[in-house]
Image (cartoon, coloured by chain):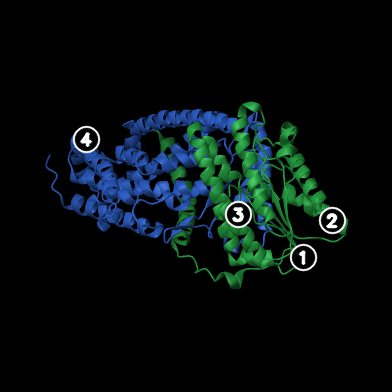
Chain colours: A green, B blue
Amino acid sequence: MKKWIWYITSIIFILGISLFAYGFSQAIAIGIEVNRAPETAQPAQENSVKPQEVDAALVMGDSLARGTGDETGEGFAGYVIKGLEASRGESLPLYNIAVEGLRTDALLSQVNDPQTREGIRSSSLIMISIGGNDLRAIERLESNQESQYFKESLDSYLVKLDEILRIIRTENEDAPIVFIGLYNLDYSPSNQERSQYLIDWNQSTQRILESFEETLFTPTYDLFKLNLEEYISADGLHPNSKGYAAIGDRILKNLGD
Amino acid sequence: MVKLIENEILKTFYKKRIHVIAGILLVLIALFAYGEHYTLTRTQDRVAEQLGIENAEDWKNIIGQQLQDLERRLDNPYIPDEGKASIQVRAEQLRFYLDNDVSPIGSTAARFMGQFIEQSIFLFLPLLIILLAGDMVSGEVNSGTVKLILTRPVKRWKILMAKLLALSMLEMFVIFMMALFSFAIAMVVFGYSGFNEPVITGFRVFEGQLDTSAVRTIPQWQYLMMTYAIGYFVAFVIGSLSLMVSVLVRSTSASIGIMMSTLIGGSFLSFFISDWKLTRYLFTVNLNLTSYISGSFQIVEGLSMTFSTLVLLGWSFGAIGIAFLVFTQKDILA
């Protein structure tokens, strides 16, 4: 008689049942909670905490504005703020509302949002990095479609950029707007055609910016050209902390404050 | 009564049913683990290549950056509280990877155990249980031993009850083997247990939109306990259905065949007529209970954890009721 088979199955059964009774009741609890309708969201005006300080800096745009790739997590905006705080001797809060992978159309709708408008109104410095993701789609195209695509996306980009700057200026007439130009990832002459697009893009951007008061176009194209190895992070796309510090440095010098 | 149950369990072991199931489990888990390992190494290579990093150790930098980014986002007054909940959950997970030196693109024994039960709960596990339960009664009829049993001075309902309880214990044994084998094999292949790793749960779809406000993390062992408990529940439901069919039908092969075709046909049906309301009351549609806690999407709208559990319980009790009714009334002639 193999009595041990009986014992083992009994022990496993008793242990298992007690364990699973607990597990199953928890699973049901989670299942019920998942199924319950969430509480209706309150209107945004009531539950949002708005930054009331008149003196704050705002940075918006794509992953570059967010600081992706920086091992210290600062991003160029972080370095700018640090520099400003050091020279002014007072703290300056920074609000980073940048979103990775953001394109110009998404930034336009973000800027249109009442909450962002409120933030723009209460900022004394606004920094923007946008357009890199709009232009980067060109890399996936066949070379014969490139110039057509470039023209179209540049045109629509400029219209939206103009709109964004206009909104910022209606909300806030005098805060300096710093715009970060695009850098290249391949400066070699074999990539000349695409580099040309990038230069065109930057120049058109600068032209739009110059039609507004108190705007600063900060080029990065030249900054990265000879320092590419040193300034690009492990992902091969975003700057590392050195690269961001270099951009921040340049902005600080331009602000001259 | 205990003697009767013990007897039933020993019969199953002597008939080598458990050995067959253990063999199937071992082979399948080994294959599954190998496949998982193979895809993982390839994914790791691809990810490393994409990120431009030399070896898999560099993932720490990238995760560290993501974590910092999330933490900064938490300080951001522009992000509403609902959004912050999901950021917090994600950050907690990333922190675990860093603190415990576990690569998020790798796999652990615990993760593998969870995946295995999630993948097998709606087809593979039921098939094993059908194999186990299909001949509980019809096997006795087949071999004629049923006459020997029924001539004993034991009430018929007691005999069937002993079979049902023995089956419940054997189902637990199968679940136990499943957990043990998948843990042991995955431990050999992946080399890290990872029972404390936080798992994200609580996703819900509300009015067509993914709602993350209820998202939270629970440790992996707790998640496994829940999924395996659900696995046992499903095994019990399938077991009682098989027992009923086994009472109704005389031959073992017919009993197993009927259950298998119902199971497979039922899951086909749910794919083809998912907008027909009545299909949600089929037991096959409701077997995938783990998807409610893991946050996978549902095929049929309007299903929920409670609904599925109740439907399965209904099927199970109905089947047990019919089985007892028929077994106590039926003339055993053959």
User: Picture coordinates of residue A151 (x, y %)?
Assistant: 53, 43
Between the residue at mark 2 and the residue at mark 4, the CA separation in whole angstroms equals: 88 Å
2 or 3: tag closer to the N-terminus: 3
Between the residue at mark 2 and the residue at mark 3, the CA separation in whole angstroms equals: 27 Å
SS of the residue under disc 2: loop
Q: Give the residue number, with chain letter if any, for mark 2.
A: A257
Tell me the kind of residue under disc 1: Asp
User: Who is closer to the viewer here, B135 or B7?
Assistant: B135
Numbered badge on residue A6: none
Q: Give the residue number, with chain letter if any, for mark 3.
A: A161
Q: Give the residue number, with chain letter if any, for mark 4.
A: B253
> Mark 3, chain letter?
A
- Mark whose residue sits in front, 1 or 2: 2
Residue B242 is left or right of residue B52, and the answer is left
Q: Give the residue number, with chain letter if any, for mark 1.
A: A55
Q: Could you tell me which residue is drawn at 49 percent across and 52 percent down?
A: A23
Both labels 4 and 1 in a single chain: no
Asked if the residue under mark 1 is in contact with the one under mark 3, i.e. CB atoms within 8 Å, the reply is no
Extreme bottom residue here?
Answer: A46
Residue A221, above or below B274:
above
